[in-house]
Amino acid sequence: MARLSLFSIVLLSLFFVASATPSEPQLAYSDGSVHTTQGWSWTDCGLPSDAIQIDSISVYPDPPMPGQNLTVIVEASAQEEIEEGAYADVVVKLGLIKLLQKEFDLCQEARNAETDVQCPVDKGHYVVEHTVALPNEIPRAKFTISARGYTVDDDDLFCVDLKVDFMKKPFFKLPIGW
């Protein structure tokens, strides 16, 4: 599990909306707006007809910090069963420079990471939480990640764009009287 990068773990979390515990949504974003926090933001670029509808994405700590554990929590709904063979195209950029362009077999990645969620993924609303150790070697830079998921039949599965800023420093408050 430690070998997974921030980018692949976010991707896995987006796809594997099935967890051991289905739940009711706490947050719902259906307008395609940008969802911003301290060091990262995400945009749902998917359509209402996509097989997976993303309700929320949160990360802890916020902002993500190299060398620390990162927990990603995704709430989403699978509108149809997701079968073996689903995949995602991921592009990671640093500014205009493309660092990674890769197709991931989502079911195989879940097996490799030994997640609780395995294919086939049943219809329903789920919360997925996954923690990964971020390497210290992540450059202090701003990254953009484009993830497009597809079913085994090449139908749209999900679409999400993320921005992660590893240049931000957390703001620490000193206690009053210091």
Image (cartoon, grey):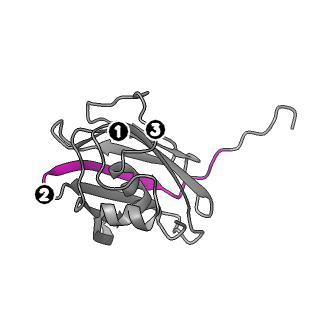
Q: Which residue is mark 1?
A: 76
Please provide percent x and percent y for residue 134.
56, 63
In front: 151, or 93? Answer: 151
- Crowdedness near tag 3: few (<14), some (14–19) or many (≥20) residues, C-alpha within 10 Å: few
Image location of residue 118, percent across then percent down: 37, 55
Does the residue at mark 1 contact the one at mark 3 (Cβ under 8 Å)? no
Q: Position of residue 69 (x, y in %)?
A: 60, 57
Label 2, secondary structure: give it.
loop
What secondary structure is found at the residue carrying circle 1? strand
Left or right: where 155 falls relative to 40: left
Residue at the disc numbered 3: 21
Marks 3 and 2 sit apart, C-alpha to C-alpha, by 28 Å
Q: Is residue 56 visible?
A: no
Q: Secondary structure at mark 3?
A: loop
Comparing 42 with 132, the one in front is 132
User: Looking at the picture, which amino acid does disc 3 mark?
Assistant: Thr
- Start-end of magenta stretch: 155-171
Q: Earlier in the sequence, mark 3 or mark 2?
A: 3
Q: Residue at x 52, y 68 (%)?
A: 138
Q: Quadrant of the C terminus?
A: top right
For label 1, count other residues whose C-alpha is less than 10 Å away and answer few (under 14), some (14-19) or many (20+).
many
Report the residue at 59% width, 47% height from top.
61
Do residues under tags 2 and 1 come within 8 Å of each other at their CB atoms? no
Q: Is residue 135 above or below residue 23?
A: below
Q: Which mark is residue 154?
A: 2
Q: Amino acid at mark 2?
A: Asp
Q: Nearer the viewer, residue 50 or 62?
A: 50
Asked if labels 2 and 3 touch by Cβ distance under 8 angstroms, the answer is: no
**Amino acid type indicated by mark 1:** Ala
